[in-house]
Amino acid sequence: MNYPLWDLPAPGLLIAFVAIVHVFVSHFAVGGGLFLVMTERKARNEHDAALLEFVRTHTKFFVLLTLVFGAMTGVGIWFTIGLVNPAATSSLITTFVWGWAIEWTFFVIEIAAAMVYYYGWDRLTPRTHMAVGWIYFVSAWMSLVVINGILSFMLTPGAWLTTASFWDGMLNPTYWPSVVARTAAAVGLAGIYALLTAARVADAPLKAKIGRYATLGWVAPMAVVLPLSLLWFISAASSAGVPVREVMGASDGSWPAIVDAIVRGSETGQPIAQRAVRAAFVACGLALALSALILMRREQYGRPLAAALMASAFVALGAGEWVREDLRKPYVIGDYMFVNGIRSSAAGNDRFTVTALNESGVLTASLWGRLPRDLDIKPPPDRLVAEGQETFRLLCSQCHTTDGYLAVRPLVQGATPAAIDATLSRLQTWRHRRMPPFVGTVTERQALAGYLATLGGMAPAQAAGSLSPSGEDGHSLFDANCSMCHGPDGPFPFSNYVSKKRSAEMFYDMLGRLPAINDAMPPLDATEAQRRVLAAYLAQLPELGAGGGR
C-alpha cells in the first residue's frame, strides 16, 4: 500500500523463474566447492594426474557458472522481490539485518577464496591450495545456513510472532530439516554437474572413474538423505500449523493418506501443488534411473545423457521449491504478512494491518492509487468499475490475472454481484484459508464484486444496480451463499447432487455442518430462519430443474 505497485501479470511467476534458476546454481556453488577440494585431495593421495587435471578444468567451469551467472541471478532475485513485494522485502531486511550482514561477510570470503583457489593452482603449494578450497566450502555452506534460516522463517516464523527475537526467527520450526535437505541437494548437484563436465572427457578410464565416483559418492547420498529430510521438513511444517493435509487434499494427516491424495488426486486439494509434488517425484525417479544408466555406461555415456540427468534434477528441485512456496499461501511471511503485503493482527498497530485497513479503506490508505481524478463526476456504473478495478489491482493482482495465470474471469463467469460479494466476505474460510481475507470497507468490497461481475459478463449498469442487500427468499440466499460453487456455471453444480431427493430437514441438518461434510466448504453464515428458508429451497430444486440462483 505504501509502495508503488509493479503492474506485471502474475509477478510471482517471475520470482519463481529467477529464484529456481538461482537456487539450482547456488546449491552447486556450495556442493561444488566441497567436490573440488575432496576430489583434489583424492587425486593427490592417489597420485592421479589425470583426475587432478580434470579438477583443474572443472574449477574453471565452476568459477564461471557460480561467480558470474550465480551472482547475476542473485542480484535478479533482489531486483524482482523488491519490485513485486517491497513490503515483505523491507520486513525481511529489518528483521534479519544482522543475518544479512553475516551472510554477506561469508559471501565476500567465498568470492575471494574461489578466485584464489582458481588462480592458485600453479602458484600455491598443494596443502595451501586445499586449505583455500576448504575456506571456500565452509564460507559457502555458512552462507547457505544463514539464508536457509530466512527462507524457512517465511514459511514458519514460529515463536518470532510473539517474541520478535532474531534467534526465534532464524531457528524456526523448519530450520533444521531445511538445512539437511539443502545440504543434501548441494552434494547431489555437485555430482550431477561433475558428470556433465566429465561427459566430454576422451580418456575412457578417467571418465569411468569420475562416473563411478560422482554417482556413488555424491548423487547416491542425496537420493537417500533428501527424501528423508523432506519428510522431516513436511512433518515439522505440519506441526507448526502449515496446512499440508489441506493443500494435498488428504483425508487426514497420516502419511498414507497424504501419499494417496498425491497419487490419486483430490477435489479438495490444490491442483497446482499436487502436480508439483508429482513432478518432483517423477523427476527424482528419472534422475535416479539416469544416474544408474550413467554408472552402467560410465565409459561411454555422452553429454545428452548427462544433460537429461541435469534437466531431471532441475525439475525436481524446482518443483520442490514451488511446493514450499505454495504451502505458504496466503502468506508471504507465515501468519504475519499476506501475499498482497497487508499485515495480519500479529503486526500490532501498523496502519497497514487488516484491522486498520478495514476502517480506513484500501483506496484511501494507498499512497500510489490510480483512480481517475474526475471519478466523482462519472456515472455510478463507471465509478463502480473504476473503484473495483483499482481494489482488484491493490488486493488481488499479486496472484491473479484477468485471463492468464490464476485467471478470475472463469471463476466469476455468470456470477451475480451478490454471490461474489458473499464470497469475498468469507475468503479466509474458503478453500482451506488459502486466500487472504478481503481487506477494506464494505463499499470497496461491493465495488470489487461489481467489477468482477462485469468480468463475468454482466453490464456495468446492471452490476451497479444489483449490489443491494440480498433478499430473504431461498433463491436470494442460494445466490449469495452457494451459487459461486453450486450454481449452473460453478465448478460443482447443484444438479450433480440431486439424484437422490432429500427433505428440507435433511438439508437443514447438512447446512449446519458443511465443513464436516466436506472440509473445503466454509460454514454457513446465516440465521436459523435463513437456514430454514434455504433448506426448503434446496429441497425444491429437483422439481425446479436444479437451476440454482443464477
Image (spheres, rainbow, N blue to C red):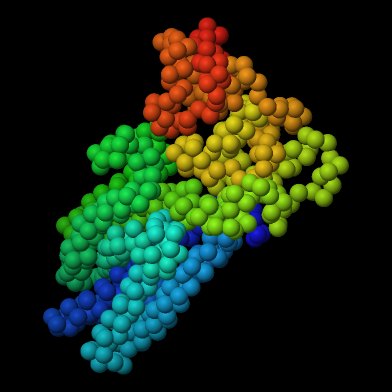
Q: Is residue 67 visible?
A: no
The image shows residue 318 at horizontal and vertical percentages of: 39, 54
Q: Is residue 421 above or below residue 232?
A: above
Say which quarter of the image contains residue 160: bottom left
Q: Is residue 394 left or right of residue 426?
A: right
The residue drawn where x is 19% and y is 80% is 41
Q: Is residue 486 left or right of residue 110?
A: right
> Which residue is the extreme one toward the left?
46
Q: Nearer the viewer, residue 271 or 374?
A: 374
Q: Nearer the viewer, residue 448 or 49?
A: 448
Q: Quadrant of the C terminus?
A: top right
Q: Quadrant of the N terminus?
A: bottom right
The image shows residue 69 at horizontal and vertical percentages of: 45, 70
Q: Is residue 407 above or below residue 151?
A: above
> Which residue is the extreme one toward the top?
543
Q: Is residue 485 left or right of residue 51?
A: right
> Which residue is the extreme one toward the front?
528
Say which quarter of the image contains residue 116: bottom left
The image shows residue 482 at horizontal and vertical percentages of: 54, 25
Q: Is residue 334 visible?
A: yes
The residue drawn where x is 46% and y is 36% is 431
- For the image, the number of numbered tags is 0
The image shows residue 78 at horizontal and vertical percentages of: 52, 66
The residue drawn where x is 43% and y is 73% is 99
The residue drawn where x is 32% and y is 50% is 239
Q: Nearer the viewer, residue 239 or 264?
A: 239
